[in-house]
Image (cartoon, rainbow, N blue to C red):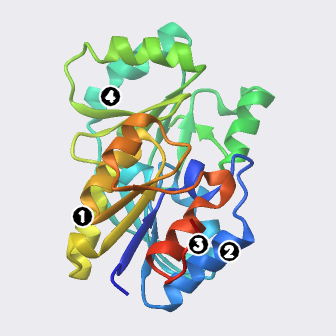
Amino acid sequence: MKYQLIALDVDGTLLTDNHILTQGTSDAIKAASAQGAEIVLCTGRAPRSSIPYMQDMGLEGSIITHNGAATVQVQGDSYTTIHEFPMNLNGLQPYIDYCRENGVHFDVNTTFNLYVDGADGLSQEVLDMYRKFLITPQNMPDWKSSPEPVVKMTAAGQADFMDKVQAEWSLWSQEFNMLRSGDFFIDLMHKDASKGAALKKLAEKRGIAPENVLAIGNYYNDISMLTFAGLGIAMDNSPLEVKAAANEITLSNNEEGVKAALEKYCLNKTLF
C-alpha cells in the first residue's frame, strides 16, 4: 500500500454529526490497517475521549491528541505519553484572567486530565458538553504544586462570542498557537504544537516519507496535517479554506466520507 501512515481527524471527519462511528467506516479503517497502513487518530480531543474509538476498532499504536500538543502510545488498555509540547503557565495567566473577568468558559488540559473552575458546581448543560466528549472535569489545581505539564487551554462559547474573543486575543503578543478547533472553541497551545508538526514527528520516527502519508480532516486545525501529508483530503463538510488546502475532497462525515476516501485511494475500490 502506498500510504503507510493514515491520519484521521475525529469530530466532523471520523464521526457523524451525532458522534457515531459507522460500521462501514470502521470496516474500511480496519481493512486499511490489515493491508499494512498504520492508522493514527489526529484530534483536538484528549486521549481519554478518543482512545475508545481506537479500541472499538481493535487498533493499537499512536494517537495524536490536543491538536498535536500530546502524542500517546496505545496498547490494549494501557497508554503512555511519548511526546508533549508543555505550555508556559506564566504566559497563559492573562488568558485565564480574561476568561474569568469576561465570563468566558474555559478549561485547562494536561495530557490526560481536564480542569475547570468550580467543577463541582457546573451546570447540567456544561456537564453534558463534556460527557459528549467522554470527559469528567476536575477542579482547577494549584499549578505551582502540580507535576503535570499543561498542553492546551480551551475557551468555549457561542460562535459569534468566540469570534469576538478571538479578535481581541489576536491583538495580543502571540506566545502560543491559537486556533479554532470548532465554531464554539478556541484552543491555545505551545507555539510549535499542531497536528501537522506532531504528524511530521511521528512519520520521521517511523521512517515514512510525507508522500506515503494520507490525512483526512474537516476544520482549520486540520490544515497543517493536510498540507504535510502527501495526500491531504478534506471532508465535504469542511469550510472553503480547508478544502483549498487539501489535494482532494471526499464525501461529508454524515455520508461516510472517510470510508469513501479509503476505498478510493487505499483499498482499490471506487465509490465516487
Which label sits on residue 200? 1
- Could you tell which of marks 3 and 1 lies nearer the N-terminus? 3
Residue 76 in the image: x percent, y percent? 58, 83
The answer to the question of whether label 1 and label 2 lie on touching residues, with beta carbons closer than 8 A, is no
- Could you tell which of marks 2 and 4 lies nearer the N-terminus? 2
Q: Amino acid at mark 1?
A: Lys
Dot 1, how many residues are within 10 Å of its Cα: few (below 14), some (14-19), or many (20+)? many
Closer mark to the observer between disc 4 and disc 3: 3
Q: CA distance from mark 4 to mark 3?
A: 32 Å
Is 242 in front, or is 126?
242
The answer to the question of whether label 3 and label 2 lie on touching residues, with beta carbons closer than 8 A, is yes
Which label sits on residue 28? none
Q: Secondary structure at mark 1?
A: helix
Question: Quick check: 139 above or below 57?
Answer: above
Residue furthest to the right = 124
Q: CA distance from mark 2 to mark 4?
A: 36 Å
Residue 231 in the image: x percent, y percent? 33, 64
Which label sits on residue 92? 4
The answer to the question of whether label 1 and label 4 lie on touching residues, with beta carbons closer than 8 A, is no
Q: Amino acid at mark 4?
A: Leu
Please give the name of the residue rendered at 23% of the width and 77% of the height, measured from the top-left corner.
205
Can residue 185 be seen from the camera position used here? Answer: yes
Q: Which residue is mark 3?
A: 54
Q: Amino acid at mark 3?
A: Met
Q: Which residue is mark 2?
A: 56
Q: Secondary structure at mark 2?
A: helix
Residue furthest to the bottom = 35
Q: How many marks?
A: 4
Please give the name of the residue rendered at 61% of the width and 56% of the height, measured from the top-left corner.
49
Is 117 in front, or is 206?
206
Q: CA distance from mark 3 to mark 2?
A: 5 Å
Quadrant for the C terminus in the image: bottom right
